[in-house]
Image (tube, grey):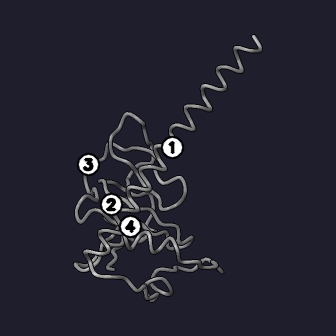
Amino acid sequence: MDYEQPNECIVNSTEYDDSYKLPVLTAGKSFILGYTNEKENVFNDRLPVIIFDDFTTATQFVDFSFKVKSSAMKILISKKNENIKFIYEMMQQIRFEIGGHGRHWISIFSKISIPYPTLPEQQKIADFLLSLDNLIESKQAQISKAEEWKKGVMQGVFV
C-alpha cells in the first residue's frame, strides 16, 4: 500500500453549497463535509483509494473525485497486486486503541502485516463484500421509508 499527503487537493474555501458538484471529504463519520465548485487540484486519478485519518485512524473507501479539508489524513493507493476494496475491508478488522494525538499511519498502521490471497481471490472477496454492502444499503433505505410512513400514519391518527 502506497500513500500520499493530500496537500495538493485541500479545498481553498469552506463555503460549501449543496448546489455544487464536488464533494469535500474527511475520513471521519461525517465523510462528506459539503460540496465545492473548485476545479483545480481535484483528486481524481488512481481511484479508488482509501482515505485514512492520521489522528483517529478512521477510514473511508472512495471511488469518486474529491477534495479534502485537512492534511491530517493520508490517501492510500493500492499496488499492482492489491485490490483496494479488499484492503479496505481488511483494515476494518484492525482493532487499535488510540492513545495520544500522534500520527498513526507511518508509526503503526503501515507496519501492520495483513495476510492476503492472490489478486483474483481478493477480487472475488471484494465483489462479494460489495454485494453485501449494496444489500445492506437497500435494506436501510427500506427501513427509512417505513419509518417515514409510520410517522405519517401516527400524525394522521392524532389529528
Q: Are marks 3 and 1 in contact (CB under 8 Å)?
A: no
Please report the residue visible at 41 percent of the width from the left and 49 percent of the height from the top.
13
Task: Give the mark, 3 or 4, whose residue is nearer the N terminus.
Answer: 3
Element marked by disc 4:
strand
Pointer 2 residue: 9
Q: Nearer the viewer, mark 1 or mark 4?
A: 1
Measured as percent of width and height from the top left, residue 79 is found at 26, 78
Task: Give the mark, 2 or 1, whose residue is nearer the N terminus.
Answer: 2
Measured as percent of width and height from the top left, residue 30 is found at 53, 52
Q: Are marks 2 and 4 in contact (CB under 8 Å)?
A: no
Q: Is residue 124 above or below residue 13?
A: below
Please report the residue visible at 46 percent of the width from the left and 87 percent of the height from the top.
112
Q: Are marks 3 and 4 in contact (CB under 8 Å)?
A: no
Q: Quadrant of residue 95?
A: bottom right
The kind of residue on which mark 2 rests is Cys
Pointer 4 residue: 50
Please report the residue visible at 33 percent of the width from the left and 74 percent of the height from the top.
4
The C terminus: image quadrant: top right
Element marked by disc 2:
helix
Task: Give the mark, 2 or 3, whose residue is nearer the N terminus.
Answer: 2
The disc placed on residue 98 is none
The kind of residue on which mark 1 rests is Lys
Pointer 3 residue: 39
The kind of residue on which mark 3 rests is Lys
Task: Give the mark, 2 or 4, whose residue is nearer the N terminus.
Answer: 2
